[in-house]
Image (cartoon, rainbow, N blue to C red):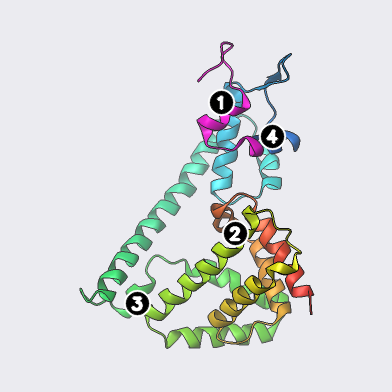
Amino acid sequence: MNSPRGRYTVKQLARLSGVSVRTLHHYDAIGLLKPSFVGENRYRYYGREELLRLQDILFHRELGVPLQEIARLLERAGRDRVAILSRHRERMAERVERSRQLLRTIDRTIAELNGEGTMDDKDLYHGFAPAKQVEYEAWLVENYGDSMREGIEASKAHWGKAGPGAMKAAFEEGRVAEAELAEQFLAGVEPGSTELEPLFDRHRAWVSHMWGRECAREGYAGMADMYLAHPDFRTYFDGRCEGFTDWLTTAMKAYAARS
């Protein structure tokens, strides 16, 4: 796969790393990952230093850091790769442990739904991050006031009465709605297009269902702001396809602005 000069072209680096050629071109354009040099044939060539920098970029992306923050973080970190990798390892280890806990919760819930045992009520939520939920709720209350706090409490009461099967069905409904929107993004539909209206009607109806009350368009725009404000959501949505978070939030706000 190596070129004769010990360097990788864009296509070769794309195959090696799994990062698309388009993304590598974008990283070059914004100064995040410049090639080692450009040959007389106008090919970009990447050496070992650039490969290590791309690894850092991918670690940050995996942890949900927005692109505009990554260059600043890498600049501040300098060349102390041991320190950088140690921090990455700590954060990834935390995520792995949480994922293990969530997998155990999923397995036990599936077993119960199949009639193969029962779970204590407290075990239904083992592995979830209460601190994150509190953080999201605090952000919404800070930006939308006491009426949002009342809505959050109403949502908790609504789902507190529902069983795990109802919650599972609700999350599946949300995944389907998001998948339909992701298809439009991949098809190149502009985020402000009115042809997206029925899909966002469905997605907003799902949000209303999750809240246990009507999600007004203003509140829906607030959801878009939260998706942008918290790296967890960017990690989730860009996990479907790179760039989906920015497209989705722009489209949500365009939809919310229409009467």
Q: Earlier in the sequence, mark 1 or mark 2?
A: 1
Q: Earlier in the sequence, mark 3 or mark 1?
A: 1
- In this view, the residue in front, 75 or 42, is 42
Please state which of the two labelled residues, at mark 2 or mark 4, is closer to the viewer: 2
Determine contact: label 3, label 1, CB under 8 Å.
Answer: no
C-alpha gap between disc 4 and disc 3: 48 Å
Q: Amino acid at mark 1?
A: Gln
Q: Which residue is mark 3?
A: 122
Q: Amino acid at mark 3?
A: Lys
Numbered tag placed on residue 12 in the rendering: 1
Q: Earlier in the sequence, mark 4 or mark 1?
A: 1
Q: Which residue is mark 2?
A: 182
Q: Secondary structure at mark 2?
A: helix
> Residue at the left extreme?
116
Q: Which residue is mark 4?
A: 25
Residue 232 lies, in percent from the top left, at: 57, 59
C-alpha gap between disc 4 and disc 1: 13 Å
- In this view, the residue in front, 200 or 107, is 200
